Image: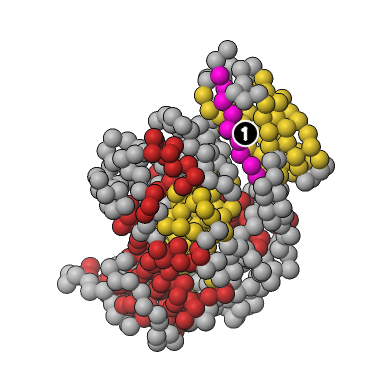
């Protein structure tokens, strides 16, 4: 490429992909609208940090249902954590954490972690690529979307992006991903809504004005020139550098921990004053089909190392946010493309499964556990999965509504469907935040099935507090077998008939969803 040609192509007002010391981002030239005010829908300084656990994390060995321990022993004796090593959780006598997660145990006991049990979606996909795409785009299992859920949210807040950005109201990147190229999660309806930082080394090269060395070839000389021009013209590089350089001291982070290194950058940029709404970081290695644990010492091994890195990184991040006086502004969540099967395999590992717990953390989180421990069959089969209690898109809807203050009426625009919102955030200042029925029905039996086991028919009795109610039958693969009810109803107690429509014998699950409340009950279909 000739220098004159490059300068002409990168002229004022032209959008171009730019390589900036290893950064994948978009550089914006001058624009007559550069100083125009952003028409943001909601003014909030809240920040959300997404932590992706690539590979499909084993939720049963992460958040351990101690009250199901005998059943777990039958299903996964070769990988199960010894009960006397499971970390206790304040207020949850039947639930504990993997012994490597002392940092998250401390945060939970301090009221800064919310466990959401049984998170999945109807008809889950067990392909890494497709399942990740579903989580990123918030699509149905049989639907393909080209935009991500966070990208649609950011497009909702900043509908004209990238025209007129950066500007005085929003001078900073809308979203930043650290550790890889920009994910589909930040893809808007028309353009990417964020930028990516390829790795921590390139971040520090940027803020220190150091360029990664280019090869000593004609192409390398041109690459050096392109990087120089990009670094001089890209306005986001300037604000990121200024924000990073304004933070001269941070709390201690663990060494040799890639997630901790990413979260340290996030804390630095937030404390440095960036108005960036969403950050995304990631760690891999969770596809543990074999050697998930060390034989004879199941509290150690690959999975234990990963969970310790996660736990230590999140604890250090939270401590740093407190040290930097910004902890009340930040909420984080972990997610993985799917969970693992109930039963372990013969290779000291687990295979692709359905539902798994999510962890929501922050000073403003509603503490404790949402949902109940999964029910483990007494004689689990290879096909058995954890039953879905909450749709992952309900977690997204709840954080959008109660953390980013998106009015409930606008959630459909972003998530493309009406999903129940959940009590995850405590004490926000969102004027549009919904008033949740927080555990009003805790301990109440809202769903009853008789007879159980059933042969031909069963009566499903349920109690609702009014509003939208969804009643569905799932099989052990997480697939929706039958939707019994999906409509608005008055408060009261009602019944529905469940017919055996030639279903194969086995364990099924009836799921009741009523606004922010849900209950799941197993039902056994027996041979006649």
Q: Helix, strand, or loop for circle 1?
A: strand
* Magenta stretch, residue numbers: 518-526
Residue 222 counted in the magenta span: no
Q: Quadrant of the C terminus?
A: top right
The quadrant of the rendering that contains the N terminus is bottom left
Which residue appears at 25% of the width and 45% of the height? 296
What residue is shown at x 32% (from left), y 82% (from top)? 209
Residue 267 shows in this picture: no
Q: Name the residue under label 1.
A: 510
Q: Which colour scheme is used?
A: secondary structure
Q: What is the residue that sits farthest to the top in this orientation?
A: 528
Give the percent coordinates (x, y) of residue 443.
Answer: 67, 47
Query: For this rendering, which residue is in front, 130 or 262?
Result: 262
Q: Main secondary structure of the magenta part?
A: strand
> Which residue is at a point 55% across and 41% down the rendered structure image?
388
Viewer-proximal residue among 67 and 214: 67
Q: Is residue 473 above or below residue 221?
A: above
């Amino acid at each position: 490429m000739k220098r004159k040609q490059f300068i002409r192509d990168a002229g004022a007002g032209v959008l171009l992909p730019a390589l900036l010391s290893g950064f994948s981002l978009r550089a914006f030239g001058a624009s007559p609208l550069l100083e125009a005010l952003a028409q943001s829908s909601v003014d909030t300084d809240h920040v959300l940090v997404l932590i992706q656990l690539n590979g499909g994390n084993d939720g049963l060995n992460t958040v351990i249902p101690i009250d199901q321990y005998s059943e777990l022993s039958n299903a996964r004796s070769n990988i199960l954590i010894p009960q006397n090593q499971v970390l206790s959780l304040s207020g949850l006598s039947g639930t504990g954490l993997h012994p490597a997660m002392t940092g998250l145990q401390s945060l939970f006991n301090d009221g800064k972690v919310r466990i959401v049990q049984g998170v999945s979606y109807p008809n889950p996909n067990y392909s890494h690529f497709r399942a990740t795409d579903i989580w990123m785009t918030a699509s149905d299992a049989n639907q393909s979307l080209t935009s991500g859920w966070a990208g649609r949210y950011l497009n909702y807040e900043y509908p004209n992006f990238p025209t007129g950005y950066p500007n005085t109201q929003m001078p900073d990147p809308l979203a930043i991903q650290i550790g890889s190229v920009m994910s589909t999660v930040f893809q808007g309806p028309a353009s990417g809504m964020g930028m990516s930082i390829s790795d921590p080394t390139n971040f520090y090269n940027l803020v220190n004005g150091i360029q990664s060395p280019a090869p000593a070839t004609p192409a390398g000389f041109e690459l050096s020139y392109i990087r120089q021009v990009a670094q001089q013209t890209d306005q986001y590089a300037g604000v990121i550098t200024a924000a990073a350089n304004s933070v001269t001291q941070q709390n201690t982070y663990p060494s040799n921990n890639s997630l901790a290194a990413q979260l340290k950058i996030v804390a630095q940029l937030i404390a440095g004053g960036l108005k960036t709404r969403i950050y995304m970081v990631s760690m891999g290695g969770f596809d543990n089909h074999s050697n998930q644990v060390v034989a004879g010492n199941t509290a150690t091994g690959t999975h234990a190392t990963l969970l310790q890195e996660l736990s230590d990184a999140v604890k250090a991040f939270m401590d740093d946010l407190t040290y930097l006086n910004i902890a009340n502004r930040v909420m984080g969540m972990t997610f993985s493309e799917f969970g693992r099967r109930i039963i372990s395999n013969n290779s000291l590992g687990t295979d692709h499964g359905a539902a798994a717990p999510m962890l929501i953390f922050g000073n403003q989180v509603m503490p404790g556990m949402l949902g109940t421990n999964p029910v483990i069959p007494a004689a689990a089969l290879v096909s058995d999965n954890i039953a879905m209690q909450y749709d992952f898109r309900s977690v997204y809807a709840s954080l959008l509504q109660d953390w980013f203050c998106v009015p409930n009426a606008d959630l459909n625009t972003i998530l493309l469907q009406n999903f129940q919102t959940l009590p995850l955030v405590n004490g926000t200042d969102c004027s549009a935040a919904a008033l949740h029925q927080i555990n009003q029905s805790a301990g109440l039996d809202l769903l009853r099935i008789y007879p159980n086991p059933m042969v031909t028919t069963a009566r499903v009795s349920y109690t609702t507090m009014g509003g939208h109610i969804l009643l569905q039958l799932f099989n052990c693969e997480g697939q929706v077998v039958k939707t019994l009810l999906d409509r608005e109803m008055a408060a009261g107690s009602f019944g529905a008939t469940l017919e055996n429509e030639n279903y194969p014998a086995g364990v099924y699950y009836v799921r009741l969803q009523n606004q922010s409340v849900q209950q799941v009950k197993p039902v056994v279909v027996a041979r006649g």
